Image (cartoon, rainbow, N blue to C red):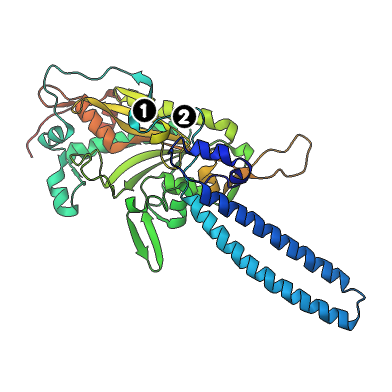
Amino acid sequence: MIDSKLLETNFDDTLQNLRRRDPNFDLSLLRSLSFERKALVGVLQELQEKRNRINKGMRGASPDEISAKRDEMKALSMEAKAKEEELRHTENRLHDALLATPNIPRECVPQGVDESDNVEVKKVGEPTTFDFVAKDHVELGESLGLLDFERAAKVSGSRFVFLKGVGARLNRAIANYMIDFHAKEGDLELNPPLLVRGSAAEGVGQLPKFEEGMFKTRRGDDQLYLIPTAEVPVTNYYANEILEESSLPMRFFAYSQCFRSEAGSAGRDTRGMIRQHQFEKIEMVRFATPDQADAEHQNMVDRASRILSDFELPHRIVELCTGDLSFSAERCFDLEVWLPSQNTYREISSCSTFGSYQARRAKIRFRPAAAPGSKKKTKAQPLVTLNGSGLAVGRTLVAILENHQQADGSIQIPRVLQPYMGGQSVIEKTSD
């Protein structure tokens, strides 16, 4: 969440920056609650000072004076109790309002309304062209016996798929290559829980804003959520902890199943594997100091681009404008892969930096190193969290099928994946 102190010390700039996301953004409630909280804290401090003065004055006082002062102390205690309850109520309202407030975009983020205002930063490779009519991944996958959407719908409903035979193996090969890639880069691999508490989803900004987009279940009285991305459990790995500056930056990656209800996306990408309820992804998660964050952000973007290049997939890097930023991000670069069947680029990775926004929600801090020779502990402060897809496995499978299709309907397997496929270089149609 944003720092509530900004509402007291720099309200106009904070409002102006948030209005870069939405010109109609209103911070009046947050500001009034912030000042109300500050006033109540001041009243409670005054009441405590009065009690201290009365206690001090009772020394050597007569019995009648002590009795009168005890009555005054009782009245002050009752008043303090009422103010403490009022303060708790105000702090709860302020907390809820802060949870509903998005992150502040960085000054360098381009101004814009939606994805049409995003800025292309770099293009890698030329869009794939063919001297035949390109098929989409659904037609290719079904004709080669790799994908079965019809039976998946019979079992689970729409937006699910069975991967079959070589299709399942190619999917596994893609995931294994990415896992090995990140491991060789030195990141620590985590195999995370797929079910998380609401507090973990709240810590990264999924709740309360995006509850409709999450699948949920119950265990006794506890409500648990299926993760929409490994970002949720991995970012919360250090929730409520203080890290030493010397340990930063920390780099993790996790391969997991992901689950999204896709609420509000009716009619969008309903065909095929682009937008499914269940999919696989390798997620990069970083913890850094503010000074390290930009370099870590660029590293994630570069790494996702290298993987796409290894798979011989044309792609581009775009910086998201203010109107297209996710709720919790302060800056984001998307990597978009070329899909011949759609004659356009489609997102396959988002690499975001969140500043201290998620760290404040999840209570993750770092302790700056003390000055040389000093034995005094420095004050802990929120660190910076970052994450990025490295990559979405299903969409990578889609891109490989479409970009590496041949005129006869077969698929050329990218060279780096052939060792993961037992040396197989081409996927051709076989009898069922």
CA–CA distance in space, label 2 to label 1: 11 Å
Where residue 55 sits: x, y (%)?
Answer: 83, 71
Q: In the image, what residue type sits under mark 2?
A: Val
Quadrant of the frame with the C terminus? top left
Is 353 situated left or right of 336 in this image?
Answer: right
Say if residue 389 shows up in the picture.
Answer: no
Is 402 situated left or right of 234 in this image?
Answer: left
The answer to whether residue 183 is above or below residue 233 is above
Say if residue 170 shows up in the picture.
Answer: yes
The answer to whether residue 185 is above or below residue 314 is below
Where residue 374 sits: x, y (%)?
Answer: 78, 39
Q: Quadrant of residue 289?
A: top right
Disc 2 packing (10 Å; few <14; some 14–19; many ≥20): some
- Label 1, on which residue? 117
Q: Residue furthest left?
A: 431
Where residue 352 sits: x, y (%)?
Answer: 44, 35
Where residue 309 sits: x, y (%)?
Answer: 33, 23
Question: Could you say whether the residue bearing mark 2 is in a helix, strand or loop?
Answer: loop
Question: Could you say whether the residue bearing mark 1 is in a helix, strand or loop?
Answer: helix
The answer to whether residue 11 is above or below residue 59 is above
Q: Nearer the viewer, residue 80 or 370?
A: 80
Q: Residue furthest right?
A: 60
Q: In the image, what residue type sits under mark 1?
A: Asp
Q: Nearer the viewer, residue 344 or 25?
A: 25
| Mark found first going from the N terminus, 2 or 1 | 2
**Which residue is located at x 16 percent, y 40 percent?**
147
- Label 2, on which residue? 109
The answer to whether residue 144 is above or below residue 150 is above
Disc 1 packing (10 Å; few <14; some 14–19; many ≥20): some
